[in-house]
Structure formats: C-alpha cells, structure tokens
Image: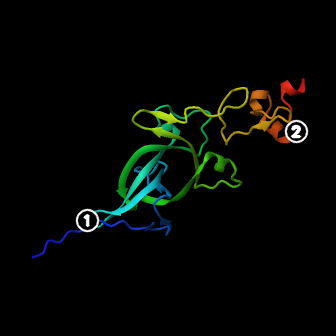
Amino acid sequence: MSNIRRRKRNPEFYKISGSGEIVRAGDCVLIKPSQPDKRPSVALVDKLETDMEGDLMVKLRWYYRPEEASFGRRQFHGAKELLLSDHYETQSANTMEGKCIVHSFLDYTKLENIGAGDYYSRFEYKVGTKEVTPSRVPVYCKCEMPYNPDCLMMQCDGCKKWFHPGCVKMTTAQALQLSNYMCDECSS
C-alpha cells in the first residue's frame, strides 16, 4: 500500500461568502467581531493557504486601533486611523466579512469622498515593545499637535502655517465663512 500525504496548497484568492468579494494576499479585510456589539477588526492578508484538513486559512497582519495600543487614543488620532502592527495570526478564511482599504496618511488626506471601508495608517506598532514608528511626526498650530484629518484647519495666507479655529479663538462656523485668513503674527 502506498503512503499518501496531503499536500498544503496556497490558493491565489478567496471569495467571501455573502458579499462575493475576491480577497488576495496584500488586500485589507474586515474580520468578524467575536461579540455582536463590537466593531470588526482590520487586518492585512499576508497569505492564503489550505491546512492539512483542507480548510482554507488566512495569515493576517493585524491593524490596531489607537485605543487598543498601550498608549491609547490621543487627540490627534482620527476616527479612521489604524496602526499597522507586527502581530500575525492565522485564522479560518470564514472569519473575513469584507474588504476595506487602508490608505497611507497622505493618500487618505487627498480623498474627496471617504467611504465606510476607507481607513488610514501613518504609524507602525510593535506589540511586544510597545514602540511606535515613526516616533516623530510634523506638528501644526499653536497647540503643536500632529494633523488630524477629522479636524478643520485653516492656513494663514501670510506665513502658510496651519491653525485650528478653536486655537485662534474662532468657531468652526466662522472659519468656514472665511475666504482668506491671516494669523495674529502676520496681521500685526
């Protein structure tokens, strides 16, 4: 009698049941939450493979939401901001509920229409050491905070610096009425 061994094979794609979306390595996906009242998790598909039992598995690289990291959510983190982690895990492909797009920070700020499946990432997070890279990013305004694309900022026509309306004693409604803006330094 011959000895037969099942061979693992790596499929090129997976079709998500229900949505019919095709997922390949390199795509970003939403993972079904373990509890119905939770948001889906976001992950990068590293590899699709069949296990020894013939079940399709997906190797994922997790994105963390800022509040899931050791330092927590900060004022400059946007609602759709994610941190690409070094945390990998293999799960059943059936845990994927749909595709999404994780843009670079710069590409996200250029989007005209942001959909429910659009996210962005500007940081990487090392889970074991709790280290974030890059450790420094540009800061703006009098408050010296990194840019949050969810918050309105206005640029001074003189010095070209960016300011939050609240930091220059202005409401968002007032800022939206302006066609030009000069900061206190440039207008004096």
Which residue position is annotated with label 1?
53
For the C terminus, which image quadrant? top right
In this view, the residue in front, 130 or 176, is: 130
The answer for how far apart the CA atoms under marks 1 and 2 are is 65 Å
Q: Is residue 81 above or below residue 187?
A: below
- Residue 121 x/y as whole percent: 56, 45
Question: With respect to residue 157, does 185 lie above or below?
Answer: above
Task: Name the one closer to the observer, 118 or 166.
Answer: 118
Q: Quadrant of residue 87?
A: top left
* Picture coordinates of residue 119, whole percent (x, y): 58, 50
Which amino acid, mark 1? Answer: Glu
Residue at the extreme left? 1
Q: Point out which mark residue 19 bears.
A: none
Which residue is depicted at the point 55% across and 32% down?
135
Q: Quadrant of residue 168?
A: top right
| Side of 122 where 172 appears, left or right | right
Kind of residue indicated by mark 2: Asn
Residue 20, how many percent across, how many down?
A: 49, 69
Q: Residue at x 29, y 65 (%)?
A: 8
State the residue at coordinates (61%, 41%): 78
Q: Residue furthest right?
A: 188
Left or right side of 12 for 115: right
Disc 1 is placed on an element classified as loop
Q: Nearer the viewer, residue 28 or 36?
A: 28
N-term-proximal mark, 1 vs 2: 1
Which residue, given by chain and number where applicable, does mark 2 sit on?
Answer: 180
Q: How many marks?
A: 2
Secondary structure at badge 2 equals: loop
